[in-house]
Image (tube, rainbow, N blue to C red):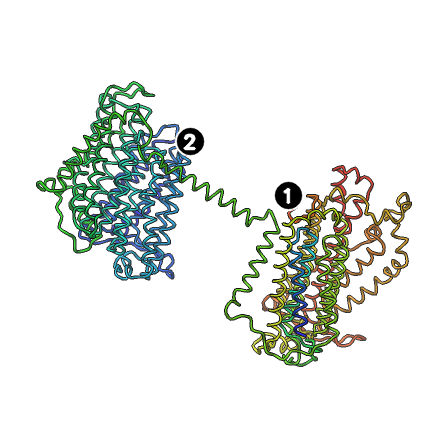
Amino acid sequence: MPDATVLTLLFILPFAGCLLTAFFPSNTRNIEAWIAGAVALGGLVLTISLYPSIAGGGSVRAEAEWLPALGIGVTIRMDGLAWMFALLVTGIGLLVMIYARYYMSPDDPVVRFFSFLLGFMGSMLGIVLSGNLIQLAFFWELTSLFSFLLIGYWHHTVRARDGARMALTVTGGGGLCLLLGLLLLGHIVGSYDLDTVLAAGERVRSHDLYLPALFLIFLGALTKSAQFPFHFWLPQAMAAPTPVSAYLHSATMVKAGVFLLVRLWPALGGTDVWFWVLVTVGLGTFTLGAFYAIFEQDLKGLLAYSTISHLGLVTLLIGLDSALGIVAAIFHMMNHATFKASLFMAAGIIDHETGTRDIRRLSGLGRIMPTTAILATVAAAAMAGVPLLNGFLSKEMFFAETIEQHVPSVFDDALPYLVTIAAIFSVVYSLRFIHGVFLGPPPTDLPRQPPRLPSWMVVPVALLVSACLLVGIFPGITAGPYLDAAVRAVLGADVPAYSLKVWHGITIPLLMSLTALVGGTLLYLVLRRYLASGIEGPPLLRHLDSPRLFDKSMVLLCWRAAAGLLSVLGTRRLQPQLRLLVGVALVAGLWPLYGPGLRMGDAAPSTFDPVLALVWVVGGTCAIGAGYLAKYHRLAALVLMGGAGLVVCITFAWFSAPDLALTQLLVEVVTTVLILLGLRWLPKRFAMIDAADYRVASTWFRRGRDLAIAATAGAGLAALAYAVMTRPVSDGSISRFFLENAYKEGGGTNVVNVILVDFRGFDTFGEITVLGTVALTVYALLRRFRPAPDSIERPEQQTRRRPEALAGEAEDGGLSDAMLVPGLIMRLLFPVIATVAVYLFMRGHDLPGGGFVAGLTMSVTFILQYMAGGTRWVEARLTILPVRWIAVGLLLAAATGIGSWPYGYPFLTSYFSYAELPLIGTVPVASALAFDLGVFVLVVGATVLILIALAHQSVRTHRPERSEASAAVASEAAAQPAREAG
Amino acid sequence: MELILALGIGVLAGSGVWLLLRPRTYQVIIGLSLISYAVNLFIFGTGRLRIGQPPILTPGTAGDPAQYADPVPQALVLTAIVIGFATTALFLVVLLAARGLTGSDHVDGREQEKS
C-alpha cells in the first residue's frame, strides 16, 4: 500500500470504529471491547508501518480539497513528531481499551464508552496528523467535546456533570482563542498550510499581529495542558472513569497543548515574550502542581496534580527556547505518558479492588496485591526521577537545560535552584503514593476486600512499566532513533548533539537529581506526621480554591451579568427600551455630523406662501395638542391627530402629489374610525386622580428628560429635512428612467401608479400580502377578545341619553332615532360611493387613483353603513365575505404575475395594449390592470375584515348575560364573529 | 417653503417621539401615527418641492425630469402610507387585546411600582 493510503486509513479508522460501536445494543460488552481493541491495534500497526517513511526526517502527506478558494483542505501529514504522538495515541489507546474491558462494570452502558473513546482517539490523531491550521483547530475542539462526554460518562453523579462542564468551558474557551490565534497566524503567513507556516518564522515574528496571535495560541495551549492559572479543571476531571483519566487526562489530550507549542516553535519561538511567558507559567505550574499533589488525599487527585506539575515542566522546557530544551521536552512528554498512564491504571486497580481511593484509608496493600504494588512502585520511581528509569533521563536533560544561561537576569540565575525545589516536591508525592498505599500496617477500613489473584487489568500496566524500564536502561536502542526522528521534524537539519546515556559521570544535573531525591525523602519524613493527620488541602494555599472561584465567576457571568443586562436591555419594560432606541437613533444620526457639521443646501428656495404657512401653523398646533391631550382626552387627541393628518394631506396635494393626497385622506378616515371603535375599550382616566404623581420630583425629571429627547429628535429631523430639500437635484437619480419609460413600457401616464403596479410590482405584491396578513392577525386576535372588567358596562354616553330606551325595543340605546335622517342619506350614498370607487380604480393607470385608493373608498362605504345602521343592522345584511376577498385578491395578483411565465418572461412582466370599446372609447388594457384589480379586491377585503372584527366587539358585550361574565358565554361570543365574518 | 415644511416635520416628529415615550398605549399609538406623518413627509421632501407639476405624463411622450415632480419618493410614500395603516390597525388590536388580558393600558401590561 502506498504511504498516503495507509495514512488516510489511519486517519479514518478510529472514526469508523466509533460509528460502528455506537450502533451496538447497549448491553453487549465484549464485542465493542474487541472492536475498540482491534481498531487501536490496527492504528498501532499502521503507525508502525509508516516509520520507514519518516525515519530520515521526511514526511508523508495525503490531501483532499475542501474549500480550495479559502486555502482550506483536509491535509493529513505525518512527520517524526506526529509519528511519535500517533504511536502514543494508538499504543496507549490499545492498552487502555484492554484495561477498560476489565475495569468497566457490566452495569455501565459500555457501548457509549467505547464509542466515545474511539472518537477521541480519532480526534487526537486528527490533531497530531493535521497539516492545516484550521483542521487542527477543528480536531482540537473535537477532543474537548469527547473529553466532556467522557468526563460526564457517569452523568448521574453531580461531580461528573460539574467536572465535565468545567473542563469543557475551560478547554473549549481556550479552543476558541486558539482558533482566533491560528486564523491570525494564517493571515500573517497568507496560508494555513502547516509547512508554509513553519517556514515563515521570520515574517511571523516581525509582524505587527505577532503578539495577539501568540497570546491567543498560548491561551489555547495553556488551557488544554492545564497550566496555571487554568489548571483547576484537571483535578475536577478525575470524576471520569479511570481509563479516561489514564488516556485523556495524563497521556494524550493534555499533551495536545505542549504538542502544539513544540509544533509551532519554529514559527513562533525565539522571542523574549515566548521565553518569559512560558518559563514563568511553566515554573509556576511545575512548583505549585507538585506542592498541591503532596497534600492531596485522593489517589487520582494526587496523580492529576502531578500531571499538571509535569506538564509545567514541559512548558518550562519549551519556554527555554533552545534546541536541547525541545529535545528534552519531547522526550519527557513520552516518558511522562508511559509512567503516568501506568500509575493511573494502578490507581484504578486499587479503586476497583478496594472500593476507595482515599490515601488515608489505604495502607499495606503491598502484601495483598503484590504485582500491582511492584509495578506502581517502579512507575512512581520513574515519576520521582530515580536512575535507571525513563523519568530520570529526561529530568536530567531538563536540569542540564535550566543551568544554561538564557536571558541575562536574576530569575534565570535562580532557575536551577527553583526547579530543584520543585523536583524535591515531586519526590515527596511519589514517596507518599508508594508509602501511603503499599507499605505500612494492613488496611482496616476498606469498603471491599481485594481478591488475592491479580486481574487482567495488570497486563497493560506491566507493559507500560516494562517500557519505562527498557527506556531507562537502554535509552540509546529503545528510544534513540524515534526521538531523533521527532526532533528532526521540529528542528530540521541542525539537530544539536545530545546523548541518551544513563551515566554521564558526576555532573551538576546528577547532583541536582541526587539533591532532589535525598531532600525529598527527608521532607517526606518531616511531613509524615502532618500528612497522616488527614487534613484536606495544602497548607498556606488552602483558601485558594480555584474551582470555587471558577464557579463564582461563572455565576457572576452567566447569572448576575446576564440578569443585569436583562434589566437594562430586556423587554419587560417598554419605555426604557424605546428611550434607548430613540437615543441610539439620535446618536447614529448625529455621529456623521461630528466634525464636518450639517451643511445646508444652496438651491434657490421656493417662494413663501402665507396660506400654506398658516395651514402649517394649524398642523403644528394640532400635533402639539395631540401630544398634550393624548393621556386624558383621547377623543380630542384623535381629532387633533386627524387635523395634523389633513394638513399632511394638503401638503401632498400642494406639492404635486395627488395620489398621495388621495390615499392619505382615505387612510385618515379609515384609521380614525378604527381608533374610535377601539376607544370604548380603554379605561377611564382622570387628571385629578393622577394629580398626586405630578407633585413628585422624579416624575418631573422623567418628563423633562423625555421632552428633551423629543425636542432633539424633532429639531434634528427638521434640520435634516431642510438640508435635504435645499440641495440641488442630482441628475443621476433613477427617477429619470421611470419618467421616460412609464408610458413607453408601462402604458400609463400616472407614473406613480405605473411604478407601483408595473415596475415595482413585486414590492406591491409583498405589500398587499402584508396587508392581508395583518387583517387576518387582527381577526384572529379579536376572536378571543376579553374586555377588561371595568369596560364591560354599557358606555356612559349610551346610558345617559335615553334610559327608558334601554328597557325595551331599542337595543342600540336609541341610536337609531338620532341617526334617522343621516342614516337614510348614508344608505343612499352606498351605490354612489361604490361607483366613485370603480371610477377611481379604472382611471388609476393614467390619472390619480388606482387599486389602493379605490379599495379604501369602497371600504368607506361599509364604514358609513355601520355608522348609519349600527353593527347589528349591517351584520344582518352583510353578504361580503372579507376573508375570501383577501384570498381572491392575492391569487389574482399572483396569477397576473405568473401569467407572464407561459410567454417566457419573468414573474410580473406586464403586457399592455389599447382596446376600442363601444360608447366608452379607448381603454388601456394592461396586465397591470388585472394586478391592480387584485390590489383593489384585497384592500377591500382586508379593511372590511378589520372593521367587522372591531365593530363586532361592541355587539356581543352588550348582551345582558355578559355582566355575569360566565366563561362559557364569553367563549361562545368569541366564536361568533368567526361565523358571521368568515 | 422648505423651511416651513422642515419645521412642520420637526414639530410632528417631536410630538410623536414625546408620545412614544409615554406610559399609556393610546399615547404610543397616536405618537406612532404622528411620527409616520413626519417620516412620510421627509421622504416626500427628498424629491424636492414642486408646485403644479404632478407626475402625470401627456400620453405618448417620454417624461423629462425637469418638467415633473419626482415620482419615486411618491411611490415610496404611497407604500408607506398603506403599510402604516396596516400597522396602526394591528397595534390598535394588540393594544385592545393587552388591555383586555391585563386589565391595564400601561405599555408594560401592569402599572409601574411607585418608588
Task: State the image coordinates of residue A195 (x, y, percent, origin top left).
Answer: 27, 57
Disc number at residue A157? 2
Q: Determine crowd level at label 2: few under 14, some 14-19, many 20+ residues with C-alpha closer than 10 A.
A: few
What chain letter is assigned to the residue under label 2? A
Task: State the image coordinates of residue A47 (x, y, percent, origin top left).
Answer: 24, 45
Assign a secondary structure to mark 1. Answer: loop
Assign a secondary structure to mark 2. Answer: loop
> Mark 2 near mark 1, Cβ–Cβ under 8 Å?
no
In the image, residue A374 above or below residue A73: above
**Residue type pointed to by label 2:** Thr
In the image, residue A75 above or below residue A307: below
Q: Quadrant of residue A189?
A: bottom left
Q: Determine crowd level at label 1: few under 14, some 14-19, many 20+ residues with C-alpha closer than 10 A.
A: few
**Residue type pointed to by label 1:** Glu
Q: Residue at x 69, y 55 (%)?
A: B29
Disc number at residue A489? none
Task: State the image coordinates of residue B77 (x, y, percent, origin top left).
Answer: 66, 67
Q: Name the residue tied to disc 1.
A: B113
What chain letter is assigned to the residue under label 1? B
